[in-house]
Amino acid sequence: MGGAHRGEDPWAAWPSIPAVIRVMAGWFLCGIGALNLAVEVDGGLAGTYLVFHVVLLLGGVLLLARHRLAPSPAGSVITGLLTLAGMAITALPVTSRCCLDEHPQRRGYPFPFLGSGDGTHVDPKYLVADLIFWGCAGLLVLTVVTLVERMLPERRTPVDLGAYAGRHAERHALAATGDRSDENVGGLP
């Protein structure tokens, strides 16, 4: 981006910005997931939070390997809908897990982010953590959908070229070139 004064296109670097953000987010998620798993390896990590940190770690790995995945648009839409559905469905049941202790009803997975019963309270910190978790879970689903799509048989309809009749230039291409049977390597003497 600094080459505009030398006549270079100042916007040439912008296509690489999403890739840089993806890689940075991947390393961040890998670091957080691995660090929390390593710190809590002595058994202090409850089942829910073990799942949370494993999903973060796997989501980070998949973000780093994302350039190898090429999901179809349908796979991306299905994954997005499942991610939103997971977030919405887990906000329905009441839980007694940590966080928002001042509210009688707590909702959300893995962290309760919605407190109710005495008014509605949304904790943005836990909401962001849950969105990251469900985003990584959606990325796992997207990977599975992409791998399944690769194993499906080809869906394009085969084309029969037997009845193809050349048009315009194709009919005259051979007539325009002379007899080259005595030439070596396509025209070189």
Image (cartoon, rainbow, N blue to C red):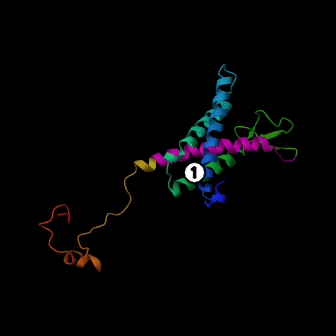
Q: Nearer the viewer, residue 168 or 188?
A: 188
The quarter holding residue 167 reads bottom left
What is the magenta range?
119-147
- The answer to if 22 sits in the magenta stretch is no
Q: Is residue 179 shown to the viewer in this render?
A: yes
The quarter holding residue 8 reads bottom right
Whether 39 is drawn above or below 3: the answer is: above
- Specify the amino acid type for callout 1: Thr
Whether 177 is drawn above or below 3: the answer is: below
- The answer to if 131 sits in the magenta stretch is yes
How many residues crowd around disc 1 within 10 Å: few (fewer than 14), some, or many (20 or more)? many
Q: Is residue 1 shown to the viewer in this render?
A: no
Q: Residue at x 49, y 46 (%)?
A: 68
Q: Nearer the viewer, residue 145 or 118?
A: 145
Image quadrant in which the N terminus is located: bottom right
**183 on left or right of 97:** left
Residue 10: percent from left, percent from top: 64, 59
**43 on left or right of 65:** right
Q: Nearer the viewer, residue 115 or 144?
A: 144
* Residue behind mark 1: 79
The quarter holding residue 125 reads top right
